[in-house]
């Protein structure tokens, strides 16, 4: 039998206020989707998530707070992200433009550019992004 200790970690953003807000939104049920850069998966040599995958959501202190199950994954151009996905990210965005501006601010941060190994990285219309949907299977702690 698999226990949550055997599951891979699920990290939203970087530790700190952003991660704390995102984890709280997941636990509140308002965040049921997230978006990652395909380039980040490639830079970390991390396989793309797949429906049915289970992970353990960690907070900023790296404490396990919930078991998540992936319910869907799509890889699309940044220009093709729709309003439903933007709203389901649970960050209060009322438009795709607002969602995109928020995400580009994160994707253009020094931390993410360092992870990508590209200090000049800029996302654009044709940037490939990974749209992931998930559900909370179990709350921990």
Image (cartoon, rainbow, N blue to C red):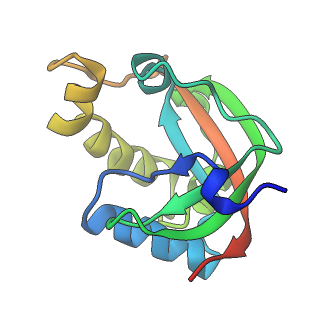
Q: In the rendering, at what x and y percent does residue 18 appear?
A: 31, 63
Q: Nearer the viewer, residue 141 or 123?
A: 141
The residue shown at (60%, 58%) is 56
Picture quadrant of residue 31: bottom right
Q: Is residue 71 above or below residue 16?
A: above
Q: Determine the residue located farthest toward the front in the rendered image.
A: 1
Can residue 92 be seen here? The reply is no
Can residue 123 be seen here? The reply is yes
Left or right placement of residue 56 versus residue 109 in this view: right
Q: Is residue 3 above or below residue 92?
A: above
Q: Quadrant of the N terminus?
A: bottom right
Q: Nearer the viewer, residue 17 or 78?
A: 17
Q: Nearer the viewer, residue 81 or 118?
A: 118
The residue shown at (39%, 71%) is 21
Q: In the rendering, at what x and y percent does residue 58 appear?
A: 47, 62
> How many labels sit on residues?
0
Q: Is residue 4 above or below residue 29?
A: above
The residue shown at (42%, 23%) is 44
Q: Quadrant of the C terminus?
A: bottom right
Q: In the rendering, at what x and y percent does residue 139 appear?
A: 66, 77
Q: In the rendering, at what x and y percent does residue 8 appear?
A: 59, 46
């Amino acid at each position: 039998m698999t226990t949550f200790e055997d599951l891979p970690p699920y990290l939203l953003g970087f530790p700190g206020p952003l991660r704390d807000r995102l984890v709280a939104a997941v636990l509140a049920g308002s965040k049921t989707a997230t978006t990652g850069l395909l380039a980040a998966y490639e830079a970390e040599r991390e396989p793309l998530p797949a429906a049915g995958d289970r992970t353990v959501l960690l907070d900023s202190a790296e404490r396990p707070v919930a078991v998540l199950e992936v319910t869907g994954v799509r890889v699309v151009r940044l220009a093709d992200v729709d309003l439903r996905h933007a709203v389901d990210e649970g960050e209060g965005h009322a438009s795709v433009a607002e969602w995109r501006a928020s995400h580009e601010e994160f994707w253009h941060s020094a931390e993410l550019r360092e992870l990508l190994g590209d200090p000049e990285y800029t996302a654009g219309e044709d940037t490939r992004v990974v749209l992931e949907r998930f559900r909370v299977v179990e709350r921990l702690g």
